Image (cartoon, rainbow, N blue to C red):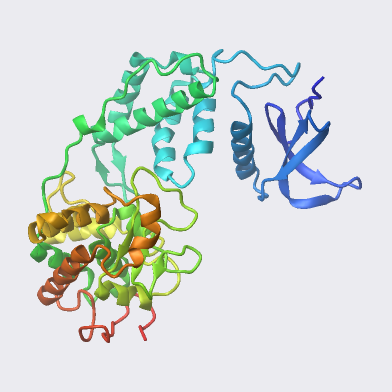
Amino acid sequence: MSKRPASKGVYQRGQYWLDWDRKRDGSLRTPYLTIFWYDNDRGRTRSTSTRTRDVAEAKGALDRHYLQHSEGADICPTCGQRMNSGSRFLLLQSIQDYLAIKADGDEAIGYRLAHVTEYIAERGDLTISCERITEEWVKGFREWLAKRPIVSKYGKERERALSTIENSVIQLAAAINFSHSRGDTARPTLFKPVPTKSINRTPHHRSDVKELASMFRFAADPRFPKKRGALHRFLIAAVATMARPDAVHDIHLGKTKRQWNSDARILDLNPAGRRQTKKYRPILPIAWQAALHFDAAEDGYYVGVQSVRSAWDTMAIEIGLPGEGQGGMKLVRRSMAKLLRDRMAKSDWQEIEMFLGHSRFDQISDIYAPFDPGYLSAARTEIEAIIDEIEKLAPGAFRRSSTGDDAEIIPIGGAKKYA
C-alpha cells in the first residue's frame, strides 16, 4: 500500500512535499529547499533539489514538478486515493498551475491573468471553480476591467483597449483548458473568447525619415545626456532591429545572455534561457552603424534596466506625435517596416517579415543561416541607408565621427569608447 506523508514540510501538493533536507543531527544537508516524494516502485523516499532558498520560488518548483509527473486530479492527503477529476477544481489553482508550466519567460501571461485574480479577490469568491466560469461571468469581468484605466507610474491615465481586455480572457480560457487536458476539470471552457483581430484598432500613423530624425534630435540633445541617454539607445536599437519594445529593452550585451556576436555582426533577440513564444524573436544582421554602438557598450542591458516610456511620452508631445495609441513605442517598428516595403523590391519583402519575426526558416536553417554573409542582406542594407539619411537630417543621431568600418563613435550615457 502506498505510504503517504501526513501534511509534511512547508508545502504539499498531492504526493509531493517541500521541506529542508536535514541530517540526523538536524543540520542542513543542502542550503536549498528540497522536493520529496515516496516512490512505490523503489520502496523509498526520493528527492530533488529546487536550487533555491526562497520559499515562494520553491513552491513554484514543486508545482511544476507535480504537474509534470502527475496525471491530473490531486491525491487526497488523508487516504492517498485520487480525488474525482473535475469535481469543482478551483479556478485560482488552475491559474497557478498554468502559470507554473506556461509562463516561464513570458511575463505578459502573468500580467494578463493578474487581472483575473484581482477580479476574483474583489468579488470575494476565492473558492470559485472552473466549472462556474460562464459567459455571464466573463461578461462581468470584461465590464469590470474596462472601467479600470491603465495608469503609468507617473499617474497618467489612458483607456484600456478592448484587445487588452480580451487577451486576459484568452489566457483565462487557456488556463482552464490546460486543467481540463490534465483531467482536473470535467469539461473545457463554457465561454468563447473574442478573436483579438476582430477588435484590434491597428494604428495607421507611420513616421517618415524626417520624423524619425526628429526623434533622434530630441533624444541626442547634448544638454540632456543622462536624462535622454536611455531613449537615445532605445532608438538606435529599435531602428537597427525593428524589434518590439520589450525585445529592445531585453538586449543584453554581456556574455551570459549570448545575444551579441560582434565578429558576425548578428544579434539574437531571444536571450539565452528565455523560451520562444508566439511573438518569435529572430536572429538579425545588424547595421554597421549600430554594431559600433553594441561593441562600445558596457556589459549589461544596452538600453538600461528602466523603461523609457516617460521619456518617450515627453518626446511625443514635443515633436508632435499623434495621440490615441498612434504614437506609442511600437511606432519605430511599424514605420521602419513601411519604409523598407516602400524601398525594397517586392521579391525581397520576405526579409522584412523575417526581421519582424513574422516569418522564419526551419529549425535547422535558423541555426546556420545567420552566419551566411547574404543573410537578410537586402533588408540590412536598406536599414543602413535609412540610418545614413537620419544622420544627415539629425547630425549626431548615431554619434559617429566618420563613416565606414573604421568609424569611431562617441559613447552615449556612460558607454565606454569603441576601440
**Residue 40, picture quadrant:** top right
Q: Position of residue 229 (x, y in %)?
A: 30, 70
Number of numbered tags placed on the structure image: 0
Picture coordinates of residue 177, whole percent (x, y): 44, 24
Q: Is residue 161 above or below residue 138?
A: below
Q: What residue occupies the far right of the structure in this picture?
A: 25
Q: Judge from the rendering whether residue 87 lies leftward or rightward of residue 194; answer left or right.
A: right
Residue sitting at x 35%, y 83%: 418
Q: From where the camera sits, is residue 90 visible?
A: yes
Image quadrant holding the C terminus, namely: bottom left
Question: Can see residue 412?
Answer: no
Is 96 displayed left or right of 116 in the figure?
Answer: right
Asked if residue 109 lies left or right of residue 372, the reply is right
Residue 49, x across and y down, in percent: 70, 46
Q: Quadrant of the N terminus?
A: top right
Relative placement, left or right, of 290 versus 183 is left
Examine the image and state in which quarter residue 211 appears: bottom left
Q: Position of residue 176 (x, y in %)?
A: 45, 24
Please tell me which residue is depicted at 40% across the width and 32% down the height of the picture: 115
**Is residue 229 depicted above or below 167 in this figure?**
below
